[in-house]
Image: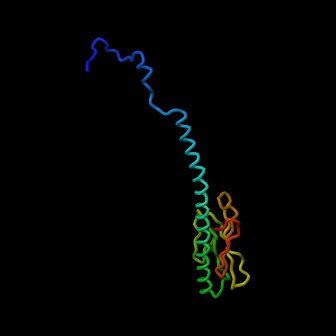
């Protein structure tokens, strides 16, 4: 190996300048990567939304089952469901059956007016602006949990 001391310039001569290539990706390579990411997103996002809906349905079922248990305990103490308060988030009588609805709940829970002290019905309706807007669940004194929407799990 010899060193040329006569030419100290850092300039590339002739064909060497043409052969030196800038590092980076070509537009085609970037477009292929973006296309692959788009296909993966098209597959993943609907599945993710379905799992979110299932989680929200689980919230409704779990909360309604807790309300049912609390209502049965209330009836055992008071001799019936009359006077039970459930699902209010404000006011002096909120939650006298002992079930607290979390502030971030995706459903609005409502205890129907009790006309017969031996019966009750609690409804959960999906809040507007969520994936489950308008979905409705219901439980009664027989622990009959029903879903009133076309996409019940």
User: In this figure, what is the number of numbered marks?
Assistant: 0
Horizontal side, residue 7 vs residue 128: left or right: left
> Whole-percent x and y of residue 19?
43, 23
> Whole-percent x and y of residue 114?
71, 80
Pick the residue in front: 61 or 100.
61
> Whole-percent x and y of residue 32?
55, 39
Residue 110 appears in the picture as rendered: no
- Colour scheme in the image? rainbow
> From the viewer's perspective, is residue 56 above or below residue 142?
above
Which quadrant holds residue 112?
bottom right
Which quadrant holds residue 27?
top right
At 62% from the left edge and 80% from the top edge, which residue is drawn?
71
At 38% from the left edge and 16% from the top edge, which residue is drawn?
11
Question: Where, quadrant-wise, is the N terminus in this rendering?
Answer: top left
> From the viewer's perspective, is residue 129 above or below residue 79?
above
Pick the residue in front: 95 or 48.
48
Which quadrant holds residue 81?
bottom right
> From the viewer's perspective, is residue 143 above or below residue 11?
below
> Whole-percent x and y of residue 150?
70, 66
């Amino acid at each position: 190996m010899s060193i040329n001391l006569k030419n100290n310039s850092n300039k590339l001569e002739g064909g060497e300048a043409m052969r030196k290539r800038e590092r980076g990706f070509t537009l085609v390579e970037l477009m292929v990567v973006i296309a692959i990411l788009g296909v993966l997103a098209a597959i993943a996002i609907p599945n993710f939304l379905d799992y979110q809906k299932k989680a929200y349905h689980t919230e409704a079922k779990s909360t309604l089952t807790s309300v049912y248990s609390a209502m049965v305990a209330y009836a055992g103490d008071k001799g019936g469901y009359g006077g039970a308060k459930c699902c209010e988030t404000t006011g002096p009588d909120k939650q006298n059956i002992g079930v607290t609805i979390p502030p971030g709940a995706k459903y609005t829970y409502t205890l129907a007016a009790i006309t017969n002290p031996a019966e009750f019905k609690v409804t959960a309706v999906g809040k507007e602006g969520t994936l489950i807007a308008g979905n409705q669940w219901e439980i009664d004194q027989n622990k009959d949990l029903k879903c009133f929407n076309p996409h019940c799990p």
